[in-house]
Amino acid sequence: MSSSTDNSAASVSNKKRPVIAIHGGAGAITRAAMSAEKEQHYLQALEDIVASGQAILAAGGSALDAVTEAVRLLEECPLFNAGKGAVFTHQGTHELDASIMDGRTLDAGAISCVNHIRNPILTARKVLELSPHVMFTGAGAENFAREHGQEMVGADYFHTDERFEQLQRAKSSESGVVLDHDGAALAASGSDDPLDADRKFGTVGAVAIDAQGNLAAATSTGGMTNKQAGRVGDSPIIGAGCYASNRTVAVSCTGTGEVFMRTLAAYDVAALMDYAGLTLQQASDKVVMEKLVALGGSGGMIAIDHLGNVALPFNSEGMYRGVGYVDEAPQVAIYQ
Ligand code: ASP
């Protein structure tokens, strides 16, 4: 949905130092199970994608363009649970969700439960730009994508053998979908997958501030391994898994979607900053380390405030993440 409102904070008159942050999901990433080679693959992918976002910002591009492209690249990378490489539903299908928000105007677009759109984030961006609505779901979202020239693929495009095996393991595990990012529990399960095959979460996202001081956030996911068909998590819900306002902050979340929805986690960071005067670090720590935890929520978020400060809190064992200020080398990490 687009509008003509300009939400630029009065204080955003100075040129900001552009910066982008990305995540590739948080989960029970057991360090012991991560080979040096595999770790290097993840780090390199994160670094390359941060660099692509930095290049857009360095060339004077918008935060909205930078987060769109970063998330598109994360969707294209089979290492991460979004686009190609998305996890399977219990029924053996894929259902992808994505959302994007422009902090300058509060325009937003989202889609959910799609499985023929190659890059859900590009369709969410089209919804933001071209539709009077904020979210389309299922067949309606796919029709909207077709009408707007989005690249469509066969459902089997999203099939990867690794994710299919994860589904089989999740189905045979005691509790099916296990909402547990606990590394100890994972180790006890004997899983050798550093992405927590059977208790898999993961989502990708990006937040950025551009040279004009405009903020944007984008989030995309395949959801949770072995989820029931039709289940929608926080990722496409504006205010839960994605939020941006130039007044305060841009946020993209990853973790136990239901808890992020019940706490409106992304918007809560903005509200704590706006109404309670908390700093970015205080607000994001309060949400991730206290409010989510109180309801059993596990995961993390990436956030950039209207001053260009960055926070990357998570309460799980790790979160794939990267940050890059323009003209600086990207910084990437997985563990604490
Ligand atoms: N939040 C996502 C969901 O619930 C999953 C994740 O971020 O790991 O669909």
Image (cartoon, rainbow, N blue to C red):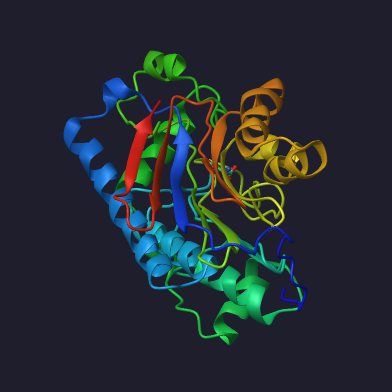
Query: At which x and y percent is residue 280?
Result: 63, 39
| Quarter of the image where ligand 1 sits | top right
Judge whether 336 appears above or below 16 on screen: above
> 8 and 77: which one is in front?
8
- Residue at the right extreme, as displayed: 275
Query: At which x and y percent is residue 297?
Result: 64, 28
Judge whether 72 appears above or below 252 on screen: below
Q: Which residue is depicted at the point 63% across and 35% down?
A: 284
- Residue at the left extreme, as displayed: 37
Quarter of the image for residue 238 reads bottom right
Q: Which residue is depicted at the point 36% across and 55% down?
A: 50
In this picture, residue 267 sits left or right of residue 79: right
> 201 and 287: which one is in front?
287
In this picture, residue 312 sits left or right of residue 159: right
Q: Which residue is depicted at the point 63% across and 40% down?
A: 257
Query: At which x and y percent is residue 23?
Result: 45, 46
